[in-house]
Image: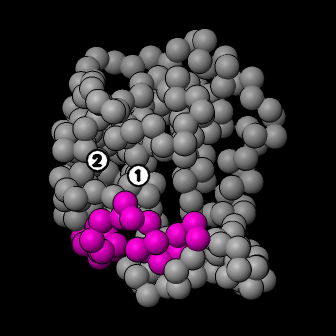
């Protein structure tokens, strides 16, 4: 499939029709950020819930229906999503901007996207050949005083057991080389004016760790379940503020 690179220019305004559609989502879905802060502290939806109303967001690698989920949970945010293809999307049209770009122009497209209150990169960096350029572009897209959220497989995941749905780093054939170097990511952010607000090398929240431990026998037979990643500590997570 040919992908056009859309260079982003000018201010973004929330589309009233899209805002109304997102705001009409079930109430149970819209209270999810508050639940996330309790059930899964530190993860993406908790991070977004700490941002001011009407925040502008660049979602880098916005697959897995992220435009729909984010705009449903935060209908007043100004959402820009960027990716190299449509990956399990149902309503990408809810995004205020939705950009598909050739892989070799990915960092350039991020750099051209403007400035945002927050940049989210949820399981994207491990798919990049040009990690340094991608991280540098994301850093440049954050306004002074803005926030960045990063999550990626931990370095220890290369030694985890293989499992359907991905538990060992190499279970996913689109993962590049080895997992991102946690210390390098932290040091790069700090060298470029970011303060680390929160970080964990292996994310293992108590509730989901227990659920994962109880479900481990079932997971071995049937594949990764909710709680499996938390039981093993598959994810590295970083919150950073641009000073």
> Is 4 or 50 nearer to us in this picture?
4
What is the tally of numbered marks visible in this picture? 2
Up-down: is 39 above or below 99? below
User: In the image, which disc is placed on residue 196?
Assistant: none
With respect to residue 151, does 9 lie above or below? Answer: above
User: For the point 19% across and 56% down, which residue is it?
Assistant: 130
- Across and down, in percent, residue 34 comes to 72, 50
Q: Secondary structure at mark 1?
A: strand
Image point 74% across, 29% down: which residue?
25
Left or right placement of residue 117 versus residue 202 in this view: left
Badge 1: how crowded within 10 Å, few (<14), some, or many (20+)? many
Which residue occupies 57% across, 62% down? 42
**Residue found farthest to the front:** 1
Q: Residue 204's quadrant in the figure?
A: bottom right
Instruction: Write the start and end of the magenta stretch as one range.
Output: 164-187
Residue 208 image-quadrant placement: bottom right
Residue 221: x, y in percent? 71, 80
- Which percent across, then down, holds residue 139? 26, 49
Image quadrant where one finds the N terminus: top left
Q: Quadrant of residue 194?
A: bottom left
On the image, numbered disc 2 is attached to which residue?
Answer: 138
Q: Is residue 182 magenta?
A: yes
Q: Residue at x 56, y 59 (%)?
A: 43
Q: Earlier in the sequence, mark 2 or mark 1?
A: 1
To which residue does mark 1 refer?
Answer: 121
Pick the residue in front: 64 or 200.
Answer: 64
Q: Secondary structure at mark 2?
A: helix
In this rendering, the answer to whether 148 lies above or below 181 is above
| Type of secondary structure dominating the magenta stretch | loop
- Whether pointer 2 and pointer 1 mark residues with C-beta atoms closer than 8 Å, the reply is yes
């Amino acid at each position: 499939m040919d992908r056009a690179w859309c260079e982003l220019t000018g201010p973004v305004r929330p589309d009233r029709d899209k805002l109304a559609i997102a705001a009409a989502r079930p109430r149970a879905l819209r209270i999810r950020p508050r639940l996330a802060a309790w059930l899964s502290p530190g993860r993406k939806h908790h991070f977004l819930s700490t941002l001011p109303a009407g925040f502008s967001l660049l979602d880098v690698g916005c697959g897995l229906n992220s435009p729909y989920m984010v705009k449903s949970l935060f209908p007043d945010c100004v959402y820009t999503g960027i990716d190299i293809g449509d990956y399990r999307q149902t309503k990408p049209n809810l995004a205020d901007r939705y950009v598909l770009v050739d892989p070799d122009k990915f960092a350039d497209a991020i750099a051209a996207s403007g400035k945002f209150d927050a940049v989210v990169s949820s399981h994207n960096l491990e798919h990049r050949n040009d990690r340094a350029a991608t991280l540098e572009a994301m850093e440049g897209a954050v306004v002074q005083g803005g926030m960045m959220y990063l999550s990626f497989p931990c370095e220890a995941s290369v030694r985890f057991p293989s499992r359907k749905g991905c538990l060992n780093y190499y279970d996913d054939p689109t993962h590049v080389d080895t997992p991102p170097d946690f210390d390098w990511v932290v040091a790069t952010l700090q060298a470029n004016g970011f303060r680390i607000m929160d970080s964990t090398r292996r994310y293992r929240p108590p509730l989901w760790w227990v659920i994962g431990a109880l479900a481990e026998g079932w997971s071995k037979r049937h594949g990764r379940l909710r709680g499996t990643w938390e039981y093993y500590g598959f994810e590295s997570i970083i919150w950073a503020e641009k000073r």
